[in-house]
Each structure stands twice: as C-alpha cells, then as structure tokens.
Image (spheres, grey):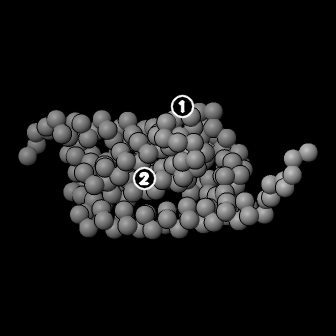
Amino acid sequence: MTTFDRRDLGLLLLRLGTGGVLAAHGTQKLFGWFGGHGIEGTGAFMESVGYAPGKASATAAGLAETGGGTLLALGLATPAAGAAAAGAMAGAAAIHTPNGFFNTSGGYEYAATLGLATAGLAIAGPGRLSLDHAFHHVVDRGWMVPTALAVTAATTALVVGARNKRLRQQKEGEQEPLFEE
C-alpha cells in the first residue's frame, strides 16, 4: 500500500514535534546550545539533585534526549528511541515530583507529557512516513517494543532508586535544631 493515511501524518507530526523538542533539550545538556549549560553545568546540577556522578548522568540524559529525540523525529529504531527518551523523562520527573504536578510550580507535568508521548510512540510505531518503514522495519520489530521498554524501565528504576537512596542518606545526616533561640 503506497497511500498514506491520516494516522501516518499524525504520527509524523507527533514524532517531529516530540523528537525535535527532546533533541533540542538534549543538546542543551551536551553542548550548551539554546541557552543550555553543557556537560559541566548540567553535571553540577545533576550532582546537586542526587544523580551521581554528575557528568556521567548529564551525558546519559543528554544522549538519551538528543539521540532518542533525533531518532524519533526520523522514525528510526522507534522502540529503542522512544524507550530511551521515556527513561530520561522519568528521571527528570523524579527531580520535579516534590513540586507537585503543574509545571508552573516546577512540577513534573512537562517531563511526564514528553515521557508518555515517547513511550506511546515506541508502542504505536512510527507510521509509514518514517525511515523504519523505508528500511522495512529492520530496527522496529514487534519483539523490540517490550524488550526496549523493559530494559529502560529496569535501568531507570535502578538509577532513580540510587538517587533517592543518596538523598535519604543526605537527609539522615542533617539535624533540625532542638530548641529555638
């Protein structure tokens, strides 16, 4: 079938928009583009919010966002790209969760939206207006979807869990004053 339908066009628009935003966001971390802080600045931030080592965490997040976003926009290796980007957004959401849901209060709304969109694309597939389709889905097989999502979920759980443990240990060392002066 050579005719494209509105589903293919809708997936293309969703991939271009979501992938483009993620790729731009990731290049802020990796290269300091678009007003970003690069690896050094992002690494220091990552360390301050419990992701250690900071530079390695910044590099991993930047690669997942830049690479995952670019691949999603192209519609190439969609299961892996969507899963990687969703994992990065789950890590970002963990930072913002204490601020509640809405982005106006510094909440996790934005990260959750991007994460759900990328996971949805990993599951739905790229549509026919994609490189995956042009390459006969060589890197977009059905078995790759649950595999990519499971590996990413396990890795993200370990990374976020280690971050949360570090934050708990830091708080244990702090003590509130016993008496007010």
36 relative to 136, above or below: above
Q: Which residue position holds label 1?
A: 104
Q: Which comes sooner in the sequence, label 1 or label 2?
A: 2
Which quarter of the figure is the C terminus placed in?
Answer: top right
Q: Nearer the viewer, residue 100 or 49?
A: 100
Name the residue at 36% across, 64% down.
148
Left or right: residue 143 compared with residue 66: left
CA–CA distance in space, label 1 to label 2: 22 Å
| Farthest-out residue, right | 181
Residue 42 drawn at (x, y percent): 66, 47
Q: Which mark is residue 131?
A: none
Dividing the picture into quarters, in which one does residue 54 lie? bottom right
169 relative to 135, above or below: below
Left or right: residue 11 compared with residue 112: left
Circle 1: residue type: Thr
Circle 2: residue type: Ala
Residue 63 in sight in this render: no
Left or right: residue 170 compared with residue 80: right
Left or right: residue 175 compared with residue 56: right
